[in-house]
Image (spheres, rainbow, N blue to C red):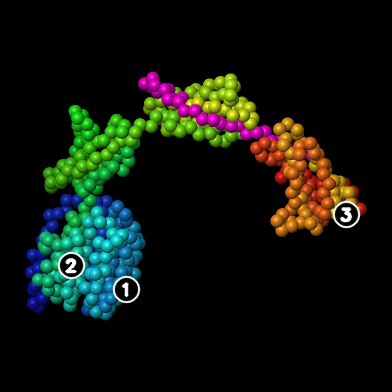
């Protein structure tokens, strides 16, 4: 009865109605916070199975609204038993579904209450190598208060390292001990509650956590040579106020720009900036319900990139190429002019295109020819910028005209063919080997012949050998022909499988 009376008294003192809900917490995930929450859960034998399940259900409800992952809120669960057990680390879950499933699957350890060992592990998780030192960190300790051990010193170490300590006690905990370990203010960070009534502290505890890890900063998520996109965590909504934005170049004599933004906004794009210039921006939430500090950021726009900055050649063929360029700047470029001619002194042709286009096909070109292509952007201001590249059309590769095989004995044939002479560098033969094939040829033999050779004698062929001949040009092989010959004696060429196919 004494504990129950004390608990009722403490509930009346510690669970005062909250005046800190400045966010108007939504039912959906909160995009308000950035930091680490490590749950230190008493999983020893002094906690009944019923209490343990209620604690897990409470944590599930407490954490449900938060957005999880890098740049948001990271949650880890460390169980206290005879030996501490890390149920899941801070980087394990980036979705609410994964976190809720992990809480549902958590099993109680039983054993002793070795809180001291668990706190040593918690220190490494929150402040050791791999931790995000720039982000706020919270240790939420849930205990039944039975024999917590010597926790004063390790808790003090955590607080000195910047970790905020909050405590929820569901049993006969020593108020004087627990009040020493929590981070002030005690009335917001220390809760005594009966396990059956634990849900009544959910909102107050969540708001206390939000105050600790609330991300009050303004940052640049995108910047170009003439614009920037700023983003921030919402602290008000359209019903409670608005945002006032000021920005200016960090140069003497420059004037300030001012914009009023709706209270439900969380980003803004600033345009008409000067390239390669440093700017400072400040954002002030304006609300009649509370005071919010001004957020500031400094950034530098990129150097101006005038089109065309890059010109590329693709889809080259014997009589055409595709020319592309960028970046596309239709608001500034009135038209593009493409000039091209064969090197070294070919006739120059000109194509003009609208400023919205960034690609065209140049047709009617000569094969196997080097061209100089110049892309010029004509700006509305009258200035002009040009970039030149070299483009080469492909060589015309005529196919082999004919291939005939004639038997000249057992395992031997006479191969004859016809091809186009223009640009020809030779012929490439491939055939299946017989008795003389080697491991290096992997069952096939090869032969290169000069361009004036139109026949050759092949011996030691395997039964039903396949012979292929391809014309060779300066840049590649042309399309060849293949023929399968039966080298058995007594057969005439008309009895062979003599279907020609392309190589």
Viewer-nearest of labels 1 and 3?
3
Q: Which residue is mark 1?
A: 107
The mark found on residue 443 in the picture is none
SS at mark 1 in the image? loop
Q: Picture coordinates of residue 394 (x, y %)?
A: 62, 34
SS at mark 3 in the image? loop
Residue 391 among magenta residues: yes
User: At 80% across and 39% down in the image, what residue appears?
Assistant: 453
**62 or 356, nearer to the observer:** 356
Classify residue 346 as left or right of residue 86. Answer: right
- Residue 451, by quadrant, is top right
Instruction: Report the Cα–Cα distance between label 2 and label 1.
Output: 26 Å
Q: Picture coordinates of residue 446 (x, y %)?
A: 74, 49
User: At 11% across and 60% down in the image, what residue appears?
Assistant: 185
Q: Earlier in the sequence, mark 1 or mark 3?
A: 1
**331 or 323, nearer to the observer:** 323
Classify residue 488 as left or right of residue 47. Answer: right
Q: Earlier in the sequence, mark 2 or mark 1?
A: 1
Viewer-nearest of labels 3 and 2?
3
Q: Earlier in the sequence, mark 3 or mark 2?
A: 2
Residue sitting farthest toward the right: 490
Q: Which residue is mark 2?
A: 155
Is residue 65 visible in the rendered structure shown here? no
How many numbered discs, if any? Answer: 3
The mark found on residue 410 in the picture is 3
Classify residue 385 as left or right of residue 210. Answer: right
Is residue 83 visible in the rendered structure shown here? yes
| Circle 2 residues within 10 Å: few <14, some 14–19, many ≥20 | many
Residue 484 among magenta residues: no
| Circle 1 residues within 10 Å: few <14, some 14–19, many ≥20 | some
Q: Which segment is the magenta one?
A: 376-402
**48 or 495, nearer to the observer:** 495
């Amino acid at each position: 009865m004494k504990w129950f009376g004390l608990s009722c008294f403490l509930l009346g003192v510690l669970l005062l109605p909250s005046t800190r809900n400045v966010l108007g917490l939504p039912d959906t995930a909160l995009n308000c916070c950035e930091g680490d929450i490590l749950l230190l859960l008493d999983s020893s034998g002094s906690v009944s199975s019923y209490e343990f399940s209620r604690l897990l259900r409470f944590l599930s409800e407490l954490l449900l609204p938060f957005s999880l992952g890098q740049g948001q809120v990271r949650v880890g669960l460390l169980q206290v038993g005879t030996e501490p057990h890390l149920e899941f680390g801070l980087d394990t879950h980036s979705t609410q579904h994964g976190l809720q499933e992990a809480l549902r699957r958590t099993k109680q350890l039983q054993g002793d209450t070795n809180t001291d060992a668990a706190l040593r592990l918690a220190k490494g998780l929150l402040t050791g190598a791999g931790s995000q030192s720039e982000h706020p960190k919270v240790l939420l300790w849930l205990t039944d208060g039975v024999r917590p051990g010597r926790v004063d010193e390790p808790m003090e170490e955590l607080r000195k390292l910047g970790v905020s300590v909050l405590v929820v006690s569901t049993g006969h905990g020593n108020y004087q001990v627990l009040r020493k370990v929590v981070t002030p203010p005690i009335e917001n960070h220390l809760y005594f509650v009966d396990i059956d009534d634990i849900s009544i502290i959910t909102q107050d505890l969540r708001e206390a956590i939000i105050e600790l890890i609330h991300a009050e900063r303004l940052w640049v998520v995108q910047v170009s040579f003439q614009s920037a996109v700023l983003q921030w965590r919402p602290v008000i909504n359209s019903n409670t106020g608005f945002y006032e934005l000021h920005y200016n170049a960090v140069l003497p004599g420059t004037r300030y720009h001012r914009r009023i933004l709706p209270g439900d906004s969380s980003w803004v794009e600033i345009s008409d900036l000067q390239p390669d210039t440093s700017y400072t921006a400040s954002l002030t939430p304006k609300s009649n319900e509370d005071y919010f500090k001004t957020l500031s950021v400094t950034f530098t726009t990129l150097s101006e990139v005038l089109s065309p900055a890059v010109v590329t050649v693709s889809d080259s063929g014997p009589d055409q190429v595709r020319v592309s360029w960028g970046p596309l700047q239709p608001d500034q470029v009135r038209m593009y002019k493409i000039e091209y001619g064969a090197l070294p002194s070919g006739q120059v042709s000109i194509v003009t295109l609208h400023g919205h286009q960034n690609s065209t096909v140049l047709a009617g070109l000569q094969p196997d020819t080097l061209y100089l292509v110049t892309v010029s952007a004509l700006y509305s201001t009258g200035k002009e910028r040009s970039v030149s590249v070299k483009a080469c059309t492909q060589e015309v590769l005529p196919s082999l005209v004919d291939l005939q095989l004639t038997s000249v004995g057992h395992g031997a044939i006479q191969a004859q063919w016809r091809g186009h002479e223009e640009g020809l560098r030779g012929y490439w033969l491939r055939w299946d080997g017989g008795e003389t094939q080697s491991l290096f040829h992997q069952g096939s033999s090869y032969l290169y012949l000069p361009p004036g050779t139109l026949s050759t004698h092949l011996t030691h062929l395997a039964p039903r050998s396949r012979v292929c001949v391809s014309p060779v040009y300066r840049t590649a092989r042309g399309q060849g022909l293949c023929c399968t010959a039966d080298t058995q004696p007594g057969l005439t060429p008309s009895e062979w499988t003599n279907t020609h196919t392309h190589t």
